[in-house]
Amino acid sequence: MKRGRIAFQGAIHQVTQAEDGRVRLADGRLLNEADVEWLPPVVPGAVFALGLNYADHAKELAFKAPEVPLAFLKGPNTIVGHRAQTRRPADATYMHYECELAVVIGKTGKNLTKAEAMDIVAGYTVANDYAIRDYLENYYRPNLRVKNRDGCTPLGPWLVDAADVPNPMALKLTTRVNGKTTQQGTTADMIFDIPTLIEYLTSFMTLNPGDIILTGTPEGLADVKAGDVIETEVEGVCCLINTIVDDETYFATV
C-alpha cells in the first residue's frame, strides 16, 4: 500500500493512492495530486544521511570510498513534501540533487544484527537531498550549511509498505531535470546495504518509529538552476517532484 499525508481545506489528511494515481481521502473522496499541498509521508523523527555510500559517486567526487558508514544528522527544518520549492541561494555556484532511497523505521530497535535489521523497517519513500558544493568544508562530515538548510530535502510523496518492496537492494534510481534523464543507478551498488546501516546505527543508539535513513546517491550529479523541475524516482516506490527557485521567489512564499 502507498500512504501519504496532505494538507487540504485547512486540515491534515492521511491519504492513499487510488488505482488511477489520484489521492484518496479517508472518506473516499478522490483528488488530483497537483491540487493538494503535500506533506512528508511520515512525521520525521531523527533523520540520518549517508555520505559516499555509492562507490561510483565517491569516484565522481574524487574521494576514497569509506570503510565504515559516514552518517550525519539532518534537522526537521530540512524536510519538505512532494511538489515543494527548494531555494538556490544567490551566492551558490554549484547546487546538485541527490536521488536517494529513504528507509522509514517502524519499530524501536537497539543492538540489532543484520539478520534482525529489516524487521524494524516500516517502508520506503524517496528523498532528494540537495547539496551546495560551495559550502562544503569537510567531505566526510558535511557542515550545516550543506545539509541543514531550510527545505533542502524533499521527501515523498508516498510511503510504500516494506512488504510491497521485496528486494530494496535491487531498485533503479533515476533523476530527470526538466524531463531529461541526468542520473541513473541502482541500490545494488550501495557500499553499505540497509541491514548493515541499521546494524551500525543501532550498535550505539536506539532507532525509533518515524526515524528515517537516507541511503546515499549514485553518480550522475548536475548543477540545477532556478526554474528547474527535478524528478527523483526510485523503481517500485514513487516519483518525487520538486522545483528550484531563487531567493526572491522563495522568500515571497515563506
Image (cartoon, helix red, strand yellow):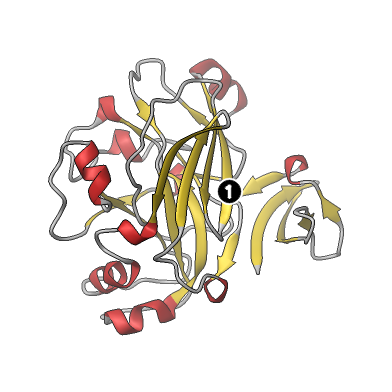
Measured along the vertical axis of the image, is residue 80 above or below residue 24?
Answer: above
Seen in the image, is 35 located left or right of residue 116?
right
Viewer-side residue, 242 vs 250: 242
Residue at image position (59%, 57%) is 41
Q: Is residue 103 left or right of residue 42?
A: left
Residue hosting label 1 = 239
**Is residue 125 visible in this depiction of the protein?**
yes
**At 38% across and 58% down in the image, what residue appears?**
187
On the image, the x and y values in percent for residue 160 come to 58, 65
Q: Quadrant of residue 135?
A: top left
Q: Split into 4 quadrants, where in the image is the C terminus?
A: top right
Q: In what quadrant of the picture does the N terminus appear?
A: bottom right
Query: Secondary structure under badge 1?
Result: strand
209 relative to 119, above or below: above
Mark 1 belongs to which amino acid? Cys
Residue 178, horizontal then vertical, whole percent = 56, 28
Compared across the picture, whether 67 is left or right of 132 comes to: left
Front in this rendered view, residue 177 or 46: 177
Q: Position of residue 253 (x, y in %)?
A: 61, 26
- Bin the neighbour count of mark 1 within 10 Å (Cα to Cα): few under 14, some 14-19, many 20 and up: many
